[in-house]
Amino acid sequence: MDKTKLSRKEREKIRHKEEILEAALSLFSSKGFHNVSMQDIASESEFGVGTLYNFFESKEQLFVELMKAGIEKIGQLLIPILDSNQEEEKKLSEFIRAHVDIIESNIEFIKLYVSQYGMSTSANPMLKDISVLKTTIAAKLESIIKAGMQKEIFRRVHPEIVALSLRATLEAFDLESSEHFEKAKVKDGVLKIERFFLNALLRKEADSDLKQSNLTRFGE
């Protein structure tokens, strides 16, 4: 949404809604969904309970919108990398390294997801957007791996299994790292994941180039 084209009143309404969602995220991630009331969210956001119900019909609807906003934010970071015109190994490298920013910028959202669902993406309607993003990312990763194989950059592997393995590894790492975030430790872990998967994928000629390029780690 282009906020510059909205009236002052409309911009203010959006800002108030974002403030409510931010307060709810903080409370849900620290106390759990079932231990937080609309009154708690109203107090935290410094709005009246009636104001909250002007934006959200229920706590459940607020939660769903919160989950959608978090997933949209992550998708906006990852999907453009996977859709870029870079070489396949570069796409995978940047995709993996982007998880440092994902963890750092979404710690409360990740904690909320873990506290509510663990690693589950079952039929719960609240998880629909998460499931869609996971499926989209896995499909894009699979396509990248297939393209790399066709160009003989990557070894002959099972693209679907490698794509799912990479996605699952990064997801588990994100969830674990959000509990006790240390940026240097997260960077080191992400670099190890990158090396493991790319060294397993790249053919010998490309593998030597990767090792040379990885002599310099990504900066602060």
Image (cartoon, helix red, strand yellow):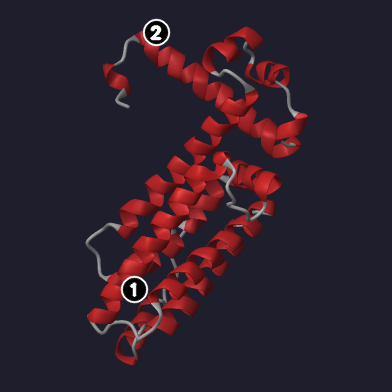
Q: Name which quarter of the figure residue 160 lies in.
A: bottom left
Q: CA distance from mark 1 to mark 2?
A: 48 Å
Q: Quadrant of the N terminus?
A: top left
Determine which residue is flagged by label 1. Answer: 145
- Give left or right: position of 112 versus 197: right
Q: Residue at x 59, y 43 (%)?
A: 124
Q: Residue at x 48, y 68 (%)?
A: 164
Give whichever of 166, 105 is nearer the camera. Answer: 166
Label 2, on which residue?
9
Residue 73 vs 36, above or below: the answer is: below
Q: Secondary structure at mark 1?
A: helix
Question: Can residue 67 be seen by looking at this rendering?
Answer: yes
Which amino acid, by three-letter code, is at mark 2? Lys
What residue appears at the point 52 percent right and 31 percent down from the top-left corner? 65
Callout 1–callout 2 Cβ contact below 8 Å: no
- Position of residue 194 measured from the top left corner of the image (x, y, whole percent): 46, 72
Numbered disc 2: secondary structure: helix
**How far from the left and from the top, in percent, is residue 158?**
41, 80
Q: Nearer the viewer, residue 182 or 149?
A: 149
Among numbered discs 1 and 2, the one appearing first in the sequence: 2
Q: Could you say which is closer to the camera, residue 220 or residue 160?
A: 160
Dot 1 amino acid type: Ile
